[in-house]
Image (cartoon, helix red, strand yellow):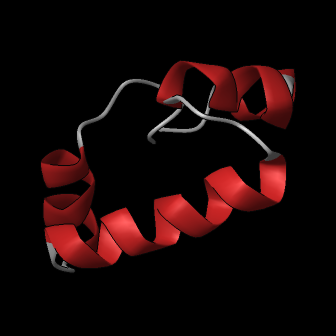
């Protein structure tokens, strides 16, 4: 969802979690994938994640 342009607030609302929870999980993902920005996520995840709603 983050790689597709959803905001942290939008992700939190859709998943019924807090914005803080989304931020914490994204921080871990960024570290594991060695990315610094949201726009770099899709490149690291590959094309199979481009169609996930």
Out of 42 and 15, give the one closest to the viewer.
42
Residue located 24% across and 50% down the image: 8
Q: Where 33 sits versus 49, above or below?
A: below
Q: Is residue 50 visible?
A: no
Q: For the N terminus, which image quadrant?
A: top left
Viewed as shown, does residue 2 lie left or right of 7? right
Residue located 17% across and 67% down the image: 19
Viewed as shown, does residue 30 lie left or right of 16? right
Q: Where 43 sits versus 17, above or below?
A: above
Out of 22 and 35, give the one closest to the viewer.
35
Residue 50 falls in which quadrant of the image?
Answer: top right
Out of 28 and 42, give the one closest to the viewer.
28
Residue located 37% across and 24% down the image: 5
Viewed as shown, does residue 24 lie left or right of 29? left
Q: Position of residue 22 (x, y in %)?
A: 34, 67
Q: Position of residue 17 (x, y in %)?
A: 21, 80
Image mark count = 0
Q: Is residue 7 visible?
A: yes
Q: Position of residue 28 (x, y in %)?
A: 61, 68
Residue located 17% across and 47% down the image: 10
């Amino acid at each position: 969802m983050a790689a597709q342009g959803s905001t942290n607030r939008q992700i939190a609302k859709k998943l019924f979690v807090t914005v803080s929870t989304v931020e914490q999980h994204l921080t871990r993902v960024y570290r594991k994938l060695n990315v610094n920005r949201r726009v770099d996520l899709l490149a690291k995840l590959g094309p199979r994640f481009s169609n996930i709603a």
